[in-house]
Amino acid sequence: MKTVWKYSIPYTRQTYGVFDIPENAFWLHTDLDPKSGEISLWYEVEPDEPRKRVNVLLVGTGQLIPEEFTRPRGTVVIAKYGLVLHLFEADAKEEKYRIVAPEPELF
């Protein structure tokens, strides 16, 4: 049975995250989490599926995007700080990124 999981990433001007998500996870939405204030990605998942590792990149407008980040995953506007941040996803082929995200929240 499918459910929705949330993965969060702290934001700076350029942040990398590493998520272990179920193989056939389907990206639903990216936004600021109203509870934590963190940038979050919500995926529809089948919890019992094998996991795959993905890299997530958070960049500001005008910053360079490494070529492996081919899947856009939303734009978040943080008006309080005058930030517009864009998320991109790539299959993780190596462990070169800095932040490993915790397990997803189930609510």
Image: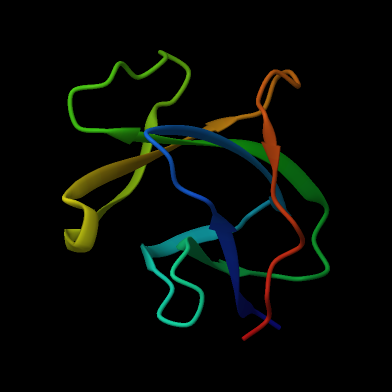
Q: Residue at x 56, y 59 (%)?
A: 8
Q: Is residue 41 left or right of residue 101?
A: left
Image coordinates of residue 28 in percent, x first then y, are: 41, 66
Q: Residue at x 76, y 62 (%)?
A: 103
Q: Residue at x 48, y 82 (%)?
A: 35
Q: Is residue 81 left or right of residue 48?
A: left
- Quadrant containing the C terminus is bottom right
**Looking at the image, which is closer to me, 51 or 80?**
80
Image coordinates of residue 62 in percent, x first then y, are: 18, 23
Locate residue 45: give its quadrant: bottom right
**Looking at the image, which is closer to me, 75 or 11?**
11
Question: In this picture, is 73 found above or below 98?
Answer: below
Image coordinates of residue 73 in percent, x first then y, are: 37, 47
Q: Is residue 63 left or right of residue 7?
A: left
Image coordinates of residue 101 in percent, x first then y, are: 69, 50
Looking at the picture, the colour scheme in use is rainbow
Question: In this picture, is 12 found above or below 7?
Answer: above
Question: In this picture, is 10 found above or below 2?
Answer: above
Q: Residue at x 73, y 18 (%)?
A: 94
Number of callouts: 0
Question: In this picture, is 90 found above or below 44?
Answer: above
- Quadrant containing the N terminus is bottom right
**Looking at the image, which is closer to me, 26 or 77?**
77
**Looking at the image, which is closer to me, 60 or 20?**
60
